Every structure is written in structure tokens, then in C-alpha cells.
Image: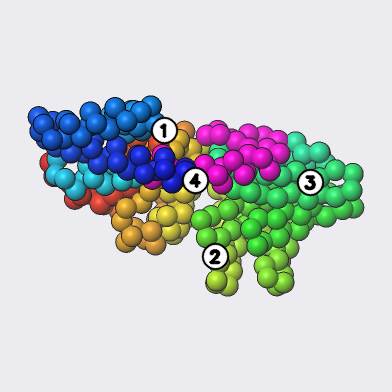
């Protein structure tokens, strides 16, 4: 995370910038800006960050409500997630940006890694273990005498020779089998999955098993994503892997709404707009800092 003093400067800069955006000719607001900038380089840098982010949103002056919301989340995005991201960068053997990547592990097994994903490769002569740290991966595992094991959060997937997808979500994990049989262990309980089975587990709940169309498993490898009665929040999280910056959903009622459809991940902003429109919402994009999903009626003209 950003240092508390840095975030405080961003919040102060955002407050001054908002007052100026609403009343640019107000001498009090102008004096507050000048005094803030004269305090030093850190203050000037914070104000410039807010100004650049504001320009990127393309938000025009409307009611006080919408600009305030935008600036709040710009501040959050600027101060969000630095430490966890650095942790993953230090631990991961393979990490992707906003594009997918094909990887051959030390064991010779193949992995397709989705955008914004990371893993630790612990395979080699002695074992075939992988830790998925974030995102999603599609494993194509050669048959051998040693089991291939994928750990993701509290879930452990064990196979011998098969193809399957493992994906981390905000509050759980999903495992979808394309070929063969896999064993999924959660809290000491094993579940066997066959080709076409999909297991979805969320923290504090029992796993749910349903069926998946084989042609649609890990479609992100072809820049597509198919959702069938998936939660709005989970679909948005998949699209977010292709976006720069942090995604915030500003309508709590959206998160659990079911979504069915196919989304073009080669144009993630359009995919997110399509998703939002399907539930009467809209987006404000301020890449590379943040993208907001908010109710259609939020803000004036």
C-alpha cells in the first residue's frame, strides 16, 4: 500500500482539485491550491497525479456527486495494492501483464497463463508442483509416474495426465476439467472431477459442481470469455485481467446478478461496457489508474 502520508497528500490534492473544478474563479480555492503547491515537491507531484487522472476520465463538470466519486476512487487506485503486487513479483517465477503467455515448466509440462496471472514453478526432477498466486492458468499435463499438483489458495488439484483450468477469484477458486480425471482437495475433503466438470468453491461454503462446454473452457486463450449464469462480479474480474489499473464496482446490487454471454477480451473496455449495459450500468475509464462501474443514473447530464 502507499504510505499513509502519501495517501493523505493525494486526498488533500483531490479535495482542492474538486473545489477548483466546480468554482475555478473562486479566490479561496485558488489560494488553497497555491499554498498547497508551495509546500514542496511531494505536494506538487500529488496534485499533478490527480490532474492527470482526472483528465484521463474525461469527466465533465456535472453534479457534485459524480466528480466526488471519481476522485475518491482515483485516490484509492493511486494508493492501492503496491505491497501485495511487489510480494507477488518477488515470489513468482512467471508473471503476465495484460496479455496471455504460454509457458513450459521445468518438468516439461505446458501452461497457458491468462493476463494478470502469476505462478511459482516448483516442478523439476523431484516433483511436479505449481502454486497459482493470482489469475488463471490452463494446464496440459503429460502422463508420468509422478502426480502433478496445483495449489491455489486453500485448494489442491492433483492429476496424472490431463488438461484443466484453475482460476483464482476474489473469494474462491474454480477448477474446470477439459480432459481426464482430477482430484480436488479442499479442507481435507477430496472430490473427483471428470472431463466437462467444473467445481466452484467460495470461502466459507461447500463446493458447487456443474457442467462446462468443452469448447468454452479457458476461452481466454483465444481472447474470448463465455459466462453462463456467472456472478457479475466474477465476470468483471476476468475482464479486469486485461485492463490497466484497478476496477471498482460502485453498485453493491450488481455483484451477485447472474450473467450469461460471450465477451471479446481483445477489447476489454468494450467487453466491460457490454457487461455493464446488460445490467443497466455504465463505466468510467481512467486507465492506467482505475475503471469504475456505476449505476446508469449516477450523476447529472
Q: How far apart, in angstroms, are the residues tagged by discs 1 and 2?
A: 30 Å
Query: Mark 4 sits on what residue?
Result: 1
Query: Is the Cβ of the residue at disc 3 closer than 8 Å to that at disc 4?
Result: no
Residue 191: give its label. Answer: none
Reply yes or no: does residue 83 show up in magenta: yes
Query: Mark 2 sits on what residue?
Result: 202
| Disc 4 crowd, CA 10 A, few/some/many (<14, 14-19, 20+) | some
First-in-chain label (3 vs 4)? 4
Picture coordinates of residue 207, whole percent (x, y) = 59, 69
Q: Nearer the viewer, mark 1 or mark 4?
A: 4
Reply yes or no: does residue 13 show up in magenta: no
247, 267: nearer the viewer: 247
279, 185: nearer the viewer: 185
The residue positioned 57% from the left and 64% from the top of the image is 201
Picture coordinates of residue 223, whole percent (x, y) = 51, 37
Residue 288: give its label. Answer: 1
Query: Mark 3 sits on what residue?
Result: 122
- Which image quadrant for residue 106? top right
- Which image quadrant for residue 7? top left
First-in-chain label (3 vs 1)? 3
Local secondary structure at mark 1: loop
Is residue 173 shown to the viewer in this render? yes
> Magenta segment, which residues?
74-103
Q: Nearer the viewer, mark 2 or mark 3?
A: 3
Amino acid at each position: 500500500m502507499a504510505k499513509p502520508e502519501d495517501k493523505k497528500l493525494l486526498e488533500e490534492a483531490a479535495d482542492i482539485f474538486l473545489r477548483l473544478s466546480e468554482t475555478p474563479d473562486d479566490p479561496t480555492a485558488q489560494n488553497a491550491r497555491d499554498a498547497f503547491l508551495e509546500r514542496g515537491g511531494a505536494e506538487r507531484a500529488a496534485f499533478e497525479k490527480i490532474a492527470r487522472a482526472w483528465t484521463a476520465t474525461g469527466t465533465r463538470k456535472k453534479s457534485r456527486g459524480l466528480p466526488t466519486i471519481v476522485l475518491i476512487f482515483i485516490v484509492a487506485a493511486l494508493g492501492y495494492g503496491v505491497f501485495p503486487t511487489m510480494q507477488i513479483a518477488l515470489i513468482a517465477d512467471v508473471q503476465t501483464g495484460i496479455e496471455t503467455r504460454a509457458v513450459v515448466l521445468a518438468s516439461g509440462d505446458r501452461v497457458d497463463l491468462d493476463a494478470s496471472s502469476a505462478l511459482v514453478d516448483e516442478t523439476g526432477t523431484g516433483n511436479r508442483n505449481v502454486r497459482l498466486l493470482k489469475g488463471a492458468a490452463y494446464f496440459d499435463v503429460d502422463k508420468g509416474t509422478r502426480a502433478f499438483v496445483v495449489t491455489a489458495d486453500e485448494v489442491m488439484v492433483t492429476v496424472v495426465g490431463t488438461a484443466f483450468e484453475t482460476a483464482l477469484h476474489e473469494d474462491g477458486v474454480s477448477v474446470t476439467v477439459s480432459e481426464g480425471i482430477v482430484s480436488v482437495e479442499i479442507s481435507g475433503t477430496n472430490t473427483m472431477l471428470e472431463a466437462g466438470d467444473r467445481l466452484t468453491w467460495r470461502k466459507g461454503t461447500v463446493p458447487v459442481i456443474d457442467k462446462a462446454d468443452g469448447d468454452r473452457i479457458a476461452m481466454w486463450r483465444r481472447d474470448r470469455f463465455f459466462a453462463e449464469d456467472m456472478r457479475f462480479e466474477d465476470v468483471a474480474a476476468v475482464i479486469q485481467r486485461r485492463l490497466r489499473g484497478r476496477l471498482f464496482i460502485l453498485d453493491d446490487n450488481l455483484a451477485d446478478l447472474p450473467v450469461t454471454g460471450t465477451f471479446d477480451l481483445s477489447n476489454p473496455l468494450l467487453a466491460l461496457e457490454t457487461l455493464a449495459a446488460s445490467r443497466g450500468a455504465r463505466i468510467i475509464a481512467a486507465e492506467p489508474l482505475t475503471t469504475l462501474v456505476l449505476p446508469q443514473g449516477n450523476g447529472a447530464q
